[in-house]
Amino acid sequence: MSGIFGVVSKNDCSQDLFYGVDYHSHLGTEYAGMAVLGEDFVRQIHSIRQDQFKSKFYDDQKLMKAPKGIGVISAFNEQPIYLNSNLGPFYIVTNGLVENKEKLAQGLFEKGVSFSEFSKKTVNTTELIAKLISQEEDLLTGIEKMFEVIEGSCSLLILNKDGIYAARDRLGYTPLAVGKKLDSWAVTTETSAFPNLDFELVKFIEPGEVVLLTEQGIFQRAQGRSANQICSFLWIYTGFPASSYEGVNVETVRERCGRLLAKRDADIEVDVVAGVPDSGTAHAIGYAMESKKPYRRPLVKYTPGYGRSYTPPSQETRDLIARMKLIPIKDIIAGNRIVVCEDSIVRGTQLKNFTIRKLWDAGAKEIHVRPACPPLMFPCRFNLSTRSTHELAARRAIKALEGRETEDVGEYLEYGSKKYKKMVEWIAKDLEVTTLRYQTVEDMVKAIGLPKEKLCLCCWQAEGLKESKEKKSEKSTQNSFLYKGK
């Protein structure tokens, strides 16, 4: 997953842009970039594999004085991408995953379109989106046509002479929100970027909606859709605790998840409740509040040096971060029965080798693992939350139990069924834990608090997202004010 941020001001926006983009650093570890438009375009892109965003861009932002700009923390592609097209020059940043990227690129190759950017020996997704948009007669038509042909999701920001165009993917999988302060407007993936920059949240952009941010206010350029199936994993794991999506705060959802996990644990006695930092922490706090057992920190994360271990693309790097970042405290661990709340179990290798093993080695008496979501069964089709099927711990368990690879996993999806129980027992044995109990789909949805049909659950359920068949009353609402500046 990536994070995108943009700001338009009647004054210089560079400082707000710099810090606004930095507040998305938990969403990517590969590349970061900013582009501004004043008298001319200025862009900077850096690798952030071994450095924090602030250290890479601190000097750059001093040279990027301008009234409007966009930026990105990217999990994969180098961006922003510049295009001097028939629609005029613009910069673009994107967040999402395009499944049919190679097919779409081949179609453009056949039309004589060339590509200059490559990521991991494949076409740069953001450049592909830019080229698709530029095939049409105007930006709005280009964005809407692009939405129609891609499979997957794509939210984007486009910076040009008009201002910043912000478009949320038509499935509503990835969020975008608009904020306002004095003479400035901002758009962000994470609303946690707003408070310290003094922006007030004014609007969550709807699925498929396109808005234009200018110094005068926000124009709606294309209406959104009422259908929305936003990624549930945002609340469970990927989102920042201070962020809200569709008006629902991440931290409070995680606390509710923990409470619901505790309610199913009346049959076990424990001494300590702990969370795998950072995203497991709030789940554990909720569990402790409900169970009346003490929340303690047997494992602490060396925050200054290590970020999240799921975002790097290579397994070797993920494992290194997982091993080095968590430091055990033997005085809290030794002789205690410990509940360990985790956001999820993807592969299970890091949890087993770099969390559970450290607890056993420090003298834990019992270890009870409680993931805040159900077993992950399917790779994410809309972002990089989960990867290929064969990597998933639940699928490895099913393969071992069935003696072969199988796509017929229906019975394993049913909480409490005989096959479900055998799968969970296999994973618990593989992890070498005392007990393992997953959150149910129903309790996870209850914790989020939105209707089930408004959530993407395709990591846990066989059916994918279904686009709304409703027709928009208008193709676009050109120059329709949503909010006016002062």
Image (cartoon, helix red, strand yellow):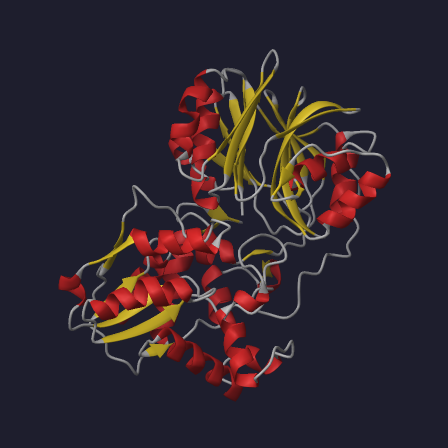
The spot of residue 72 in percent (x, y) is 53, 35
Numbered label tally: 0
Does residue 344 appear to the left or right of 268 in the view shown?
A: right
The spot of residue 394 in percent (x, y) is 51, 73
Residue lying furthest top: 39
Tell me which residue sits at (39%, 35%) in the image: 52
Could you say which is closer to the camera, residue 1 or residue 283?
Answer: 1
Residue lying furthest left: 331
Q: Quadrant of residue 108?
A: top right
Tell me which residue sits at (43%, 34%) in the image: 22
The C terminus, quarter of image: top right
Residue 486 in view (yes/no): no
The spot of residue 168 in percent (x, y) is 64, 43
Tell me which residue sits at (68%, 36%) in the image: 127
Could you say which is closer to the camera, residue 221 or residue 328?
Answer: 328
The spot of residue 349 in percent (x, y) is 41, 65
Q: Quadrant of residue 86?
A: top right
Position above or below: 360 against 116: below
Residue 58 in view (yes/no): yes
Position above or below: 345 against 216: below
Could you say which is closer to the camera, residue 277 or residue 407?
Answer: 407
